[in-house]
Image (cartoon, rainbow, N blue to C red):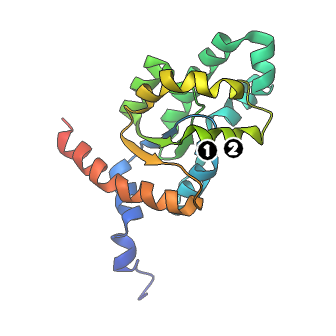
């Protein structure tokens, strides 16, 4: 580097192009529990040099209790209403990588907010992968209902801007695939902007 200038290759890197095209929008990861939204999201945020935010962690912080406790004490409708409020607030804080809960995008208002203030990425995973990953954790209230929830949720997830297959590969490979898919989609959004 000469005189502290940014090297040309850094200015034209895919990551730099993505950040310019994103502006203040968030990259919003959607998909079933166990799809890898948090672990892949952390790596994606690190690669792009922007914050990673987990909506579930923010919900627990706002409620002062864990998600299983919220479900047990108040029920799923109460949880979903709080989840929608938290995601709406978080979408005002981009650019960031935002991991959402598996049912977050079932709310039409939340989907519309994500469409307007984010770039949605569906981490699509096969049922076998999801069951294997969620079996390891006992803190997911709906984990025993994955097979039942998938048919209703997948058509909604499929409305995402980008779909990437989450599978038993190193997470950095999945991150590479997300980064590779973003520039073309962001360019198309720019062209279609009013």
Q: How many marks?
A: 2
Q: Measuring from the top left, give residue 57's x and y in whole percent.
A: 70, 36
Specify few, some or many for label 2: CA neighbours under 10 Å numbering under 14, 14-19, or 20 or more. some
Q: Measuring from the top left, give residue 142's x and y in whole percent.
A: 69, 24
Query: Residue 118, labelled with which disc?
Result: none
Query: Up-down: is 47 above or below 120?
Result: below
Question: What's the CA distance linking mark 2 and mark 1?
Answer: 6 Å
Could one spot residue 81 in this view of the protein?
yes
Judged from the image, the secondary structure of the residue bearing numbered disc 2 is helix
Query: Up-down: is 143 above or below 176?
Result: above
Residue 13, located in which quarter of the rendered image? bottom left
Query: Residue 129, labelled with which disc?
Result: 1
At 27% from the left and 53% from the top, the residue drawn is: 184
User: Quadrant location of the N terminus?
Assistant: bottom left
Query: Residue 133, labelled with which disc?
Result: 2
Q: Measuring from the top left, give residue 93's x and y in whole percent.
A: 52, 39
Residue 62, located in which quarter of the rendered image? top right
Tag 2 near tag 1, CB within 8 Å:
yes
Judged from the image, the secondary structure of the residue bearing numbered disc 1 is helix
Q: Measuring from the top left, give residue 167's x and y in whole percent.
A: 55, 51
Of all residues shown, which one is farthest toward the front? 128
């Amino acid at each position: 580097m000469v005189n502290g200038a940014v090297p040309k290759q850094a200015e034209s890197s895919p990551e730099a192009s993505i950040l310019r095209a994103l502006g203040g929008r968030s990259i919003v990861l959607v998909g079933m529990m166990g799809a890898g939204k948090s672990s892949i999201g952390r790596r994606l945020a690190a690669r792009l040099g922007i914050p990673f935010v987990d909506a579930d962690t923010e919900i627990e912080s706002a409620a002062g209790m864990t998600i299983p406790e919220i479900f047990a004490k108040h029920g799923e409708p109460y949880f979903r209403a709080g989840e929608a409020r938290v995601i709406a607030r978080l979408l005002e804080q981009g650019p960031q990588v935002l991991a959402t809960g598996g049912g977050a995008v079932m709310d039409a208002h939340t989907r519309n907010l994500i469409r307007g203030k984010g770039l949605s990425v569906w981490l699509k995973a096969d049922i076998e992968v999801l069951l294997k990953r969620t079996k390891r954790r006992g803190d997911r209230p709906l984990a025993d209902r994955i097979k039942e929830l998938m048919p209703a949720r997948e058509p909604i997830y499929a409305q995402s801007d980008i779909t990437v297959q989450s599978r038993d590969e190193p997470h950095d490979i999945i991150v590479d695939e997300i980064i590779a898919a973003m520039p073309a989609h962001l360019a198309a959004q720019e062209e279609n902007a009013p």
